[in-house]
């Protein structure tokens, strides 16, 4: 089997040790790539590549093949990989090997020619310690054409000894070496030990399914297999019984792979009695978790007249609002920054409607205010984890924000109250309301980090609430909404803070606009202030527009929501004349 590993694995370790030319656009390109802004990533990487950064060249090769956001472009990939490889970059050498291995270049040549060319590129990358190249080189040397099993097994051993994304794959290949006695002395017990370790390290579905899959058809007698840390050895009843016990336990606990294998055992009559009806029950449970082999087997066993007609999901409603784009554009202010977080669909809590649309609209307005694109930190959805938010607050911003900078910090998503400490928390994507102190980010800590910055001014806008009573606020299961309100303005210090609601209120949304009611009128107020260059642009000029309109909109929804403002309301933020 050949392995095509993603760039997080491929470049791990190399970037830490390297100080390539044109590092700044390259690192910015990495940030854009992590945010899935592939167009921006390619532009920044191209700048770095043009200045001779061989890591950017290799990364561009990866973006064009296997590809990130579009159909692969072999010609582009070949050009960038070749440049990087000529510079001696192991990632570029790896990429060239990958192109030959997959038959994407010199397509008129024989498979043996392309295999040998792949080996020629993988070798120097492997010699530089490039783990993914070692693994792919090993698989090529294992092939029938080259067949250097001793060299292949040695490479698998080297990779298996290194913790990381390639380790489990190498262990599985090494177990094959031991089991077959090809390239090293046959040792079934060592093979079994490695297979157990892979199961414990990864709980990998592909490895677990080796038992039950033979070209998509269950054949549970086909392989010697290890399930979790208990051996399955068809040479003995004890191993078989132990494995069945583990599989049954996991199937009942809801594991899709175990449910599939249990169905296969029923269908094949592993206990001496075939029971197709029981097999279908288990396949259905596994298929309900989107497990492909179970779906395939279930389809084969279901008569055509019993199959359910496919349902077509309704297309999501397309929202459009007059605040999605800014109606103004100020000249660029190179020293200004924006840190924008928007989380709509959380991992562990209900969604915060329109939060990511809010964040996108705020981003458009920040750019219109003159914040350079390179100075906008934009974390939405599952990119907005606590470690990433903390890294930018505690490390990146202090290194980049200057004494004359204006920083805009915007958050749209759920807030939560800690009933014991009376502290307000912002919820990252993976937060758990019952463990706020370890999985969420306290507003107090956010304010403290922002107050430490040497910025001229920091403007905070929070479209969330902290009552635990619904809207953009959640509370741990079993607790009731707070009676005593939390003050989201406490500890704001020198910051100018706009909050969507008072501490005992709910922050709502406007369905017709597809935005939070606070964000909608905040951005309208911002645009209105910009449109009046004869007046001072102050926090109050926004707040006096914002407050009555949010109150009116929430009253029409039969609730109360009063935006809050803390800080120097009369301070002139900047001259827009």
Image (cartoon, rainbow, N blue to C red):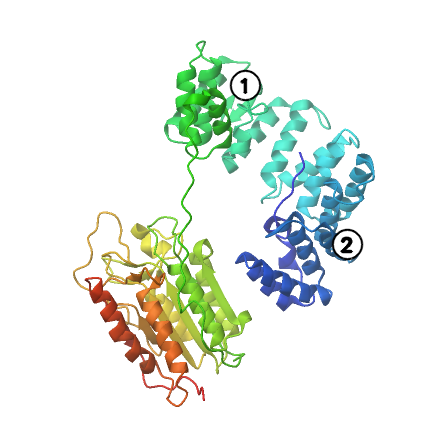
Displayed quadrant of residue 145? top right
Q: Residues within 10 Å of mark 2 (few under 14, many from 20)?
A: many
Q: Nearer the viewer, residue 214 or 225?
A: 214
Q: Which residue is drawn at 30% across and 78% down?
A: 545
| 299 vs 502: above or below | above
For marks 2 and 1 on the same chain, the one whose residue lies earlier in the sequence: 2
Q: Is residue 176 above or below residue 438?
A: above
Query: Which element is circle 2 on?
Result: helix
Regarding residue 243, the answer to whether it shows in the image is no
- Horizontal placement of 370 versus 6: left or right? left
Question: Where is residue 27 shown, x and y percent of the image?
Answer: 60, 64
User: On screen, 186 above or below 37?
Assistant: above
Q: Of helix, strand and loop, which one carries label 1?
A: loop
Residue plotted at (33% across, 77% down): 493
Tell me if residue 534 can be seen: yes
Is residue 97 rendered to the left or right of residue 352? right
Q: Mark 1 points at which residue?
A: 219
Q: Distance between the residues labelled 2 and 1?
A: 45 Å
* Extreme-left residue of the structure: 483
Residue 386 location, quadrant: bottom left
């Amino acid at each position: 089997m050949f392995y095509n590993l993603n760039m997080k694995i491929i470049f791990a370790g190399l970037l830490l040790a390297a100080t390539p030319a044109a590092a700044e656009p390259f690192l910015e390109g990495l940030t854009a790539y992590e945010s899935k802004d592939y167009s921006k990533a390619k532009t920044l990487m191209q700048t770095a590549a043009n200045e001779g950064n061989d890591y950017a060249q290799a990364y561009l090769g990866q973006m064009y093949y296997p590809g990130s956001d579009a159909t692969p472009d072999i010609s582009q990939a070949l050009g960038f990989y070749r440049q990087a490889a000529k510079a001696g970059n192991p990632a570029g050498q790896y990429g060239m090997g990958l192109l030959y291995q997959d038959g994407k270049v010199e397509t008129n040549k024989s498979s043996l020619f392309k295999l040998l060319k792949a080996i020629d590129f993988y070798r120097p990358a492997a010699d530089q310690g490039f783990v993914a190249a070692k693994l792919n080189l090993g698989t090529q040397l294992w092939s029938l054409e080259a067949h250097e099993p001793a060299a292949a097994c040695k490479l698998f051993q080297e990779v298996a000894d290194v913790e990381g994304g390639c380790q489990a794959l190498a262990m599985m290949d090494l177990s094959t070496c031991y089991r077959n006695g090809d390239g090293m002395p046959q040792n079934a017990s060592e093979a079994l030990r490695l297979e157990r370790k892979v199961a414990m390290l990864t709980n990998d579905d592909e490895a677990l399914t080796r038992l039950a899959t033979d070209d998509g058809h269950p054949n549970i007698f086909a392989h010697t297999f290890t399930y979790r840390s208990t051996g399955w050895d068809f040479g003995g009843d004890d191993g078989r019984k132990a494995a069945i016990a583990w599989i049954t336990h996991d199937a009942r606990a809801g594991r899709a792979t175990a449910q599939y294998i249990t169905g296969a055992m029923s269908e094949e009559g592993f206990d001496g009695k075939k029971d197709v009806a029981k097999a279908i029950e288990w396949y259905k449970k596994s298929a309900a978790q989107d497990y492909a082999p179970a779906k395939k087997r279930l389809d084969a066993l279901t008569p055509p007249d019993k199959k359910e007609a496919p349902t077509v999901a309704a297309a999501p409603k397309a929202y459009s609002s007059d605040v999605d784009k800014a109606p103004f554009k100020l000249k660029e202010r190179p020293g200004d920054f924006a840190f924008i977080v928007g989380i709509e669909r959380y991992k562990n809590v209900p969604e915060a409607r329109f939060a990511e649309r809010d964040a996108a609209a705020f981003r458009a307005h920040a750019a219109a205010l003159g914040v350079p694109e390179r100075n906008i930190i934009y974390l939405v959805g599952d990119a907005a984890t606590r470690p990433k938010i903390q890294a930018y607050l505690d490390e990146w911003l202090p290194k980049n924000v200057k004494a004359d900078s204006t920083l805009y910090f915007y958050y749209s998503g759920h807030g939560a109250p800690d009933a014991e400490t009376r502290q307000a928390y912002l919820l990252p994507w993976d937060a758990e309301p019952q463990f706020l102190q370890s999985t969420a980010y306290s507003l107090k800590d956010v304010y403290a980090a922002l107050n430490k910055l040497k910025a001229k001014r920091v403007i905070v806008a929070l479209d969330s609430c902290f009552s635990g009573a619904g809207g953009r606020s959640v509370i741990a299961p079993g607790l009731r909404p707070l009676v005593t309100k939390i003050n989201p303005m406490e500890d704001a210090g020198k910051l100018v803070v706009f909050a969507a609601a008072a501490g005992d209120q709910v922050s709502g949304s406007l369905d017709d606009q597809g935005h939070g009611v606070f964000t909608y009128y905040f951005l309208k107020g911002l645009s209105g202030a910009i449109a009046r260059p004869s007046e001072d642009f102050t926090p109050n000029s926004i707040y006096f527009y914002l407050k009555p309109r949010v109150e009116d909109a929430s009253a029409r929804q039969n609730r109360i929501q009063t935006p809050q403002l803390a800080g120097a309301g009369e301070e002139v933020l900047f001259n827009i004349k």
